Amino acid sequence: MKQSLRGFLAAALVAILVAGCAMQPPGVVDRAPDQDPDQLLGQAEQQAPEQAAKTRLEASSIMARQGERDNAFETAEAIDESLLSETDRVRWALLFSELARALNEPRAVLRATQVLDDGLSMQANQQEVLEERQQWARTALDQADPVRVALPELEGQEIRRIVVALPESGPLSSVANTIATAMRQHHEVQGGSAELSFLDASRYSLEELYDRAQQMNAQLIIGPLDKDQVTQLEQRDSVPLPTLALNYGNSDNNQAQRLFQYGLSAEDEARQAARRAWQDGHRQMSMMVPDNGWGRRVGEAFWNEWQRQGGEITNAVRYNPESSVSNAVQTALNVSGERARLGNIDALFLLALPEYARQVPPTMDYYYAPNLPIYATSHLYEGRQQTRLDQDLNDVMFMDIPWQIPNAAVGGEEALPFASTYRSLRDESDASMFRLMAMGVDAYELAIRLSNLAELDGLTGSTGTLHLQSDGRIYRELPWAQFQNGTPSPILSPSRESSDE
């Protein structure tokens, strides 16, 4: 049980309510520690080909569980799967296709899923997962249109004239002002040569904005911010100028040439949480999301990604943020007789704002579930040190942008992307708006690289590692942290409470 203030308070409360009862929290059996994957790879060099292939598969699996996705992919890619037993070939196919899909490598997914044609013995759910990934890869290759994300009019040029079209009035004006302020500050700190011109998007239609930008001889536009406007643009065949929209449209795909989309997507975070939980060895999840439009969208993203990997959702709770946390936790954890029933629950996915999120772990302690792993999005962290309040989040794993969790990032604060801008903005901005500040910085950096699209795939940004997809959408990979003593700390290895497959 966690050694925190909430743990002692929860234990005391239980003792008062069930005085004289001899019930004790269930014991926990820790996972045996993984072997060193580098040591395994060294062993493989000395082994016969068949055994070496099996050893490399084990090393790749360990790397994946430890979050070393690129190394795991390279190791799995180098395996000659024909040397593996049938059972291990299925394991390899599931692992390699999972990694390839996460890295947006559809051709590698097709290689992995070739085992479907070999008549191998596998479980029905394994076959369904591989068939779904095979279909994804075929669709991705069909949709991959190099012309769509090419910008021949900018290729080889230096970006010097950028128009930023953001609203200065209306419901999005505060968000827009924060993003614009960060762009200006970053441009000044970096000494950029590009000229930034700002247009009030709330005064003009989309057509008028493009007309004015062309009159100003702009090479590209940053904006719009409004989701409905981005949806309108992505349904066109093309846009008049290269455009970096600061939101994602509602369509399944962006079909407009010259249009790129970037933003802080909660759905992306949910999908990453699903992949992380799977890599940590969990297979049966419970989930808690708020009962509103935001919760439904993000919950659906987690659900779909989890099921695509072959996982099972045991319980799905849509809670009222204004109601008792206890009721939601009881449903999520199958509480019966004041005790959680976790026989078919490996871990919990939590989407919640800080005030609500802080109540969940103590409630789980009360119902004898103190060691159930919790995976969460960035929304439970306010972005500033509050060790007393955040003690109740101890052991919760969550992702966030590098700028929000500098002590959990590799190399610490000094190694942060655009560290000089980070320091100039850190002390003068509202913590609740700091993610938007980082978004403004990355939007600027993406824009000045539109003349060389290769630089946009794998760009290390202040909001995460940025990847350009074939339809012009940009998604983020975020670092993970875990609360320890009320402070976000790096996760160096998978959760020890992860369940075995």
Image: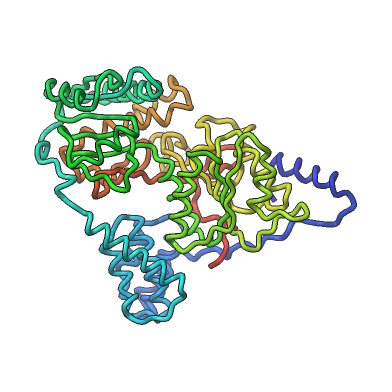
Q: In this view, does 354 lie to the left or right of 459?
A: right
Q: Name the residue furthest right.
A: 20
Q: In this view, does 123 lie to the left or right of 116?
A: right
Give the residue displayed 33% in from the left and 80% down from the top. Answer: 118
Residue 105 picture quarter: bottom left
- Residue nearest the observer in this picture, 292 or 197: 292
Q: Position of residue 272 (x, y in %)?
A: 43, 50
- Note whether 451 is above or below 78 in the view shown: above
- Residue nearest the observer in this picture, 261 or 155: 261
- Note whether 446 is above or below 343 in the view shown: above
- Residue nearest the observer in this picture, 232 or 398: 232
Residue 189 picture quarter: top left
Give the residue displayed 73% in from the left and 59% down from the top. Answer: 26
Give the residue displayed 23% in from the left and 59% down from the top. Answer: 141
Q: In this view, does 306 lie to the left or right of 190?
A: right
Q: Where is residue 327 in the image (x, y as percent from the top left)?
A: 69, 44
Q: Position of residue 94 (x, y in %)?
A: 40, 68
Residue 10 picture quarter: top right
- Note whether 130 is above or below 204 in the view shown: below
Q: Position of residue 160 (x, y in %)?
A: 15, 26
